[in-house]
Amino acid sequence: MAEKQFILTAEGLKKIEQKFDHLKSVRRREVAERIKQAIEFGDISENSEYEDAKNEQAFIEGEIITLEKMLRNSKLIDEDEVGTDVVSIGAIVVLKDLEFGDELEYAIVGSAEADPAELKISNESPVGQAILGQKVGSVVEVNVPAGILKYEVLEIRRVKN
């Protein structure tokens, strides 16, 4: 089975590379130092500091492996080639909530860099899936646990460089 491809914008790729480098160069050293200090306390069989540090080390190594896989299997979106005629990954979309009248602006990104707090939604999310390929003026219905949401696509644009 082929490994999942991670679709990233240039900004998303940069953030993942920075996190990867930080984990490898800074966090690994910090945890190794914590383990060394915990061993100096003596009997490691009943040493909670040692256990905590080893658990943190395992978590960091898992994160490093995950980020390595993302970087190895990433596909970079050329933001200059993102069209404004239909919603695509890398585009910014303004939606109107037809029930409440609110306007929402989202960047459509791959799942690896989705962050709702930064208004970046995944192309694999219910809203992302529903609006991909839609044009300005399209009305979409999105099935979510709370029911059906209706949005109108008001605007599609590129990320400002």
Image (tube, rainbow, N blue to C red):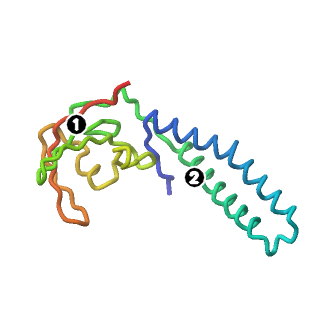
Residue farthest to the bottom?
Answer: 46
Residue farthest to the front?
Answer: 41
126 sits left or right of 137 in the view? right
Horizontal and vertical percent for residue 21?
Answer: 64, 40
- Element type where label 1 sits in the image: loop
Horizontal and vertical percent for residue 146?
Answer: 22, 66
149 sits left or right of 78 in the view? left
What is the count of numbered marks?
2
- Discs 1, 2 touching: Cβ within 8 Å: no
Res 104 label: none
Res 66 label: 2
Q: Residue at x 23, y 44 (%)?
A: 104
Of 128 and 72, the residue lying toward us = 128
Q: Earlier in the sequence, mark 1 or mark 2?
A: 2
The answer to whether residue 72 is above or below residue 150 is: above
Q: Residue at x 67, y 60 (%)?
A: 56
Of 130 and 24, the residue lying toward us = 24
74 sits left or right of 35 in the view? left
Of 34 and 81, the residue lying toward us = 34
Identify residue type, mark 2: Thr
Q: Residue at x 50, y 57 (%)?
A: 1
- Label 2 packing within 10 angstroms: few (<14), some (14-19), many (20+): few
Horizontal and vertical percent for residue 118?
Answer: 38, 44
The answer to whether residue 44 is above or below residue 86 is: below
Measure the C-alpha gap from mark 1 to mark 2.
Answer: 32 Å
- Element type where label 2 sits in the image: helix
Q: Label 1, on which residue?
A: 86
Q: Quadrant of residue 119?
A: top left
Q: Quadrant of residue 41?
A: bottom right
Q: Residue at x 60, y 47 (%)?
A: 68
